[in-house]
Image (cartoon, rainbow, N blue to C red):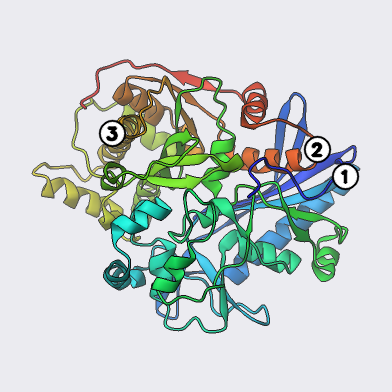
Amino acid sequence: MTTTGTALNTAPAPAGAVFAAVDIGASSGRVILGRVSSSGVELEVVHRFPNGVVEIDGGLRWDFDALFGEVLKGLAAAATVAAARNETIASIGLDTWAVDYGLVNTDGELHAQPYSYRDDRCLAAVAPVHQKLDPARLYGTAGLQFLQFNTLYQLAAEPDLDGLQALLIPDLIAFLLTGERRTESTNASTTGLFGAVAGEWATEFLSALGLPAKLFPPLVEPGETIGTLRPEIASRLGLPASTEVVAVGSHDTASAVAAVPAQEGNFAYISSGTWSLVGLELKHPVLTEASRAANFTNERGVDGTIRYLRNMGGLWLLSECQRTWASEDVTLGFPDLLRAAAALPPGGPQIDPDDSCFIAPDNMPERIRAAVRHSGDLLPDDPATITRCIMDSLAAGYAKAIIAAESLAGRTVDVVHIVGGGSQNKLLCQLTADATGKKVVAGPVEATAVGNVLVQARAAGKVSGGLTDLRRLVAASHGLQTFTPQQLSRL
């Protein structure tokens, strides 16, 4: 399989070429124009839109029709902005969250609005899957952290897959744009049906679970061209039909890690947002029983790297608290909450941010307080105190995950890079430095979009080199902030 990021197109990007990045998370999405030069990457957000789960047909699903409509609106806005500046959109890259998919029939029609990983329908499928495929065997091949919503459990919960094909969310968007059915490899590696060593579909798992052999389309690597725009889509967007959709690290974490501005070889990363992805970048997966027991995952990264990490709770905890507080007419923004939390003394109660009780939405402050009570402590019903509990708990969880990753992979890291929305959270960054005892470098905030754009630019010949070269561009063009340990960790 291709692991060098080499694109299928051979013509270099024209002068004035820009790149459109569609970056969608579990709570919002953006369409961004990226301009790349030898001095770095410049981003311009041209469209923002909300995203979130909705209850449809008795389950928590994504309103994909509305989501795709926003993607088209954003790409049309990007085309307008580019044209006004005499720029050419050289390609489009797509990244979203992982594991979820849409089912498409032979006519290319969406079978139903895709389920969200936050729906609990797959809980009943876990035990039957493990009866057919022992967890140790699953891990020995896929190397995937056990999460109850992993794609293979979701698929096992489907009542009927006859005549249907599964397209992961970014692949579904690419299909609607181009008519081409492909599965990008970094996202494929989150399904539990992908071989961590082989880099191919684990067809024996599909067979064992009674799933169709061609349930997923063929694989494509970051940097390869998926296809060009359908004529009707191109006309609607105001773009040439020759505009390419290029595979990037379509799992948003893969794109984010590609943009980690690491200038030191031994680094850990934290992609901090709705979820926290905490780990190391390796050349080979770690498939030991100890790694499985520690619940670490081996997901594919750009250029065939391995993202050895734990998927942990994240800032979803605080955003859900804010939603509850807003319903109670307590409206405090992130800056106010963090300032109040930072003024509190250290040493307060903590929770396990990975506890499955925090996955679903609904009155997060009370669930956090209940978890603290269950541990034999008390947490006041006060937004600042609850916020501090969340920040302390996340930082402690990050430190434990990094210590475990170092031990399991036989590596020692010198610096921790925090990218994504959490890199703006100075309290969390400082607490992480304190908990790990390591230097923390924060930024860029828009790492996912930066990684998306850089992979496109390299495919178009605008830049060259490996991940180290791309990361130098990131470090040169984005302001980074450093935090050093100030107090002893409780670990």
Q: Residue furthest left?
A: 376
Observer-nearest of 432 and 252 = 252
Q: Residue at x 26, y 57 (%)?
A: 357
Vertically, is 104 above or below 322?
Answer: below
The amino acid at mark 1 is Ala
- Say which quarter of the image contains residue 229: bottom right
Q: Is residue 105 left or right of residue 38?
A: left
State if disc 1 and disc 3 touch (CB < 8 Å): no
Residue under label 2, please give it.
461
Residue under label 1, please give it.
11
SS under mark 1: loop
Precedes in sequence: disc 3 or disc 1: 1
SS under mark 3: helix
Q: Is residue 381 left or right of residue 331?
A: left
State if disc 1 and disc 2 touch (CB < 8 Å): yes
Distance Cα–Cα, label 3 vs label 1: 47 Å
Vertically, is 267 above or below 159?
Answer: above
Residue 323 placement (x, y as % from top left): 39, 54
**Label 2: how many residues lie within 10 Å, few (<14), some (14-19) or many (20+)?**
some
Residue under label 3, please give it.
400
